[in-house]
Amino acid sequence: MVRSDIVQAFEEEHSRRQVDWTNVSLVNRPIDVIHHWPVPLKRQIGNPEASQRNLRNQVSYTLHKFRKSHPIYQIQCGLQGSVGSQGRRQVQDEYIQSMLDSKVIVVAQRDGWEDHYRIWEALVSGALVLTDPMLALSQYKHAFRNGTHWIVYESLTQLTELVKYYLQHESERNRIAQAGMEHALQYHRSWHRVEEMVFG
């Protein structure tokens, strides 16, 4: 669900930048792609000790290789702001700015886990969200749809193909990003969850 403090942080940053954040095509986004996870060492990929991070590691490593073979694109992988529970309990300015500066945000769930704040925050930022498949988010009353609100990648090869495609197709990228942001704000704020619990 979309946290109100995150929405407020986006509003304040756009106000500071003097940009209408409700129209994603008006926002200057110098970063082409961002994935909020560091690039792992090669030996960490597939390491059983890092089992909850394997997908995220693979995604960062794949984007890192893609950046090397496509130097025209500005691609960043890494954590922004404080990490761990401290970073999740309060709004991190670096994190907010990195999302608002990005055309595409790649999200990868923890292995064996679905549905976390990163996907909600990415959607509300107005960037195009590329995510791995998730059952949980398709079960909501107002579900997100692949190709309408975000883009689902099924493999690492498809991820790089989708990144390249959407960086080359700005109007389509902005249309999906706009729809994803509006859908998240209209149906997935924290009070929507409370109303669903209380009223069904």
Image (cartoon, rainbow, N blue to C red):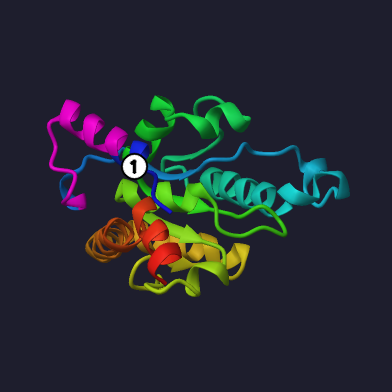
The prevailing secondary structure element of the residues shown in magenta is helix
**Residue 16 shown left or right of residue 42 in the figure:** left
**Residue 17 shown left or right of residue 143 in the figure:** left
**Residue 174, image x, y percentages:** 25, 59
Magenta highlight on residue 14:
yes
Find numbered disc 1 in the image and state the secondary structure of the residue it sits on: helix
Task: In the displayed orientation, state which residue is furthest to the front.
Answer: 198
**Residue 57 shown left or right of residue 66 in the figure:** right
Figure quadrant of the N terminus: bottom left
Residue name at image x 53 percent, y 34 percent: 88
Magenta highlight on residue 127:
no
- Residue type indicated by callout 1: Ser
Q: What stretch is highlighted in magenta?
A: 8-24
Residue occupied by mark 1: 4
Q: Is residue 165 above or below residue 38?
A: below
Q: In this view, does 92 lie above or below 168?
A: above
Q: Which of 39 and 91 is in front in this view?
A: 91
Residue name at image x 49 percent, y 73 percent: 138
Residue name at image x 87 percent, y 50 percent: 48
**Residue 181, image x, y percentages:** 29, 56
Within-10-Å neighbours for mark 1: few <14, some 14–19, many 20+ = few
Residue name at image x 66 percent, y 52 percent: 110
**Residue 162, image x, y percentages:** 45, 64
**Residue 35, image x, y percentages:** 52, 44
